[in-house]
Image: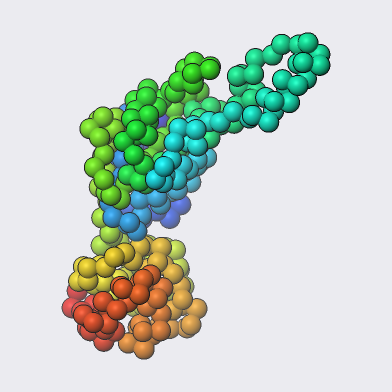
Amino acid sequence: MNSKMTLDEFEQAMAKIGYITKKRDRIALTAYLAMQLEKPILVVGPPGVGKTEIAKSLSQALDAFLIRLQCYEGLDENKALYEWNYQRQLLRIQMQKANLEEDDLFSQEYLLPRPLLQALMSQNPCILLIDEIDKTDAEFEAFLLELLGEFQVTIPEMGTIKAKQRPMVILTSNGERELSDGLKRRCVFLNVNPPSVEKEVKILRAKLPDLPKKLAYQVAKAVGVLREKLVLQKIPSVSETLDWAKALLVMGKADLDPAWVDATLNLLLKSQEDLELFYQEMGAERLLWEAKEL
């Protein structure tokens, strides 16, 4: 990782790949400081606010390979760190019996690295994304502490493996459970909220250059109303806002009207409960009226 990069150069690299930041943007500044301090970043916020996108954008801006560990309930050390190639070990045992040769069956030759070990063993700059860490249990979180604090892991059969070069580590959390103080101490903390209307307009215009400016504002304002005014099970993410805007662009729309809100709302709201809530408490005409008032 290029730790010699200045903050201005870093912000320019982020802007170049289309990640919308303003001068001394809090997200960009936090990522830059974490890179300089060689500390992981813990990115916390509700689903859909772009936490994972931060890691993807850093990977592009820094020209670093992205290694992703998607967390889930029941994830254990073997699936996240390494497994032994048992078939190859068994074949080697059979060959040893036939040739009377001895071999170390627990060497790197028989190791199957999983995402965590891949990041530590990488010869090239990489970003390690540990996505949705709050879905794992406290035992797995405790297992991560050695890696996050010292950038090394201990494999019983082989000993301690240290990072060839320190990966930049991004952990994300939706806040489903409280994370331990030990994990928080090892990380730079970053809380991410849904983007403002102005920032989302910039994102839409950057990702969809052909999108009319007026429609970009209408889409961003309408999505802002949905996020703020309704208690949804799942708020629309930035990627879903982009899908909605792209669909309207494909259909040749230059203006947003109630009929097209009704026809395309399923691109934003992804559950029947949220759709029913929208029509019970708001409806398309009121949505557009509320958006104009923003």
Instruction: Identify the residue at horizontal 26%, vertical 76% (top origin).
Output: 277
- Quadrant assignment, res 130: top left
| Left or right: where 159 falls relative to 193 | right
Residue at 28% in and 59% down? 194
Q: Is residue 249 visible?
A: yes
Task: Give the vertical position of 161 relative to 274 (above or below).
Answer: above
Q: Residue at x 44, y 36 (%)?
A: 76
Please state the horizontal and vertical placement of residue 163, each as a whole percent of the image.
47, 24
Q: Quadrant of residue 94?
A: top right
User: Quick one: quadrant of the C terminus?
Assistant: bottom left
Q: Nearer the viewer, residue 2 or 128?
A: 128
Vertical comparison of 256 with 39: above or below:
below
Is residue 118 visible from the viewing direction of this image? no
Q: Position of residue 173 (x, y in %)?
A: 32, 46
Instruction: Indicate the position of residue 128 as horizontal and vertical percent values.
Output: 45, 38
- Which residue reaches farthest right? 98
30 or 79, which lies in front?
A: 79
In this rendering, the answer to whether 224 lies above or below 68 is below
User: What colour scheme was applied to this rendering of the protein?
Assistant: rainbow
Which part of the image, by quadrant, shows the N terminus?
Answer: top left
Q: Position of residue 155 (x, y in %)?
A: 49, 21
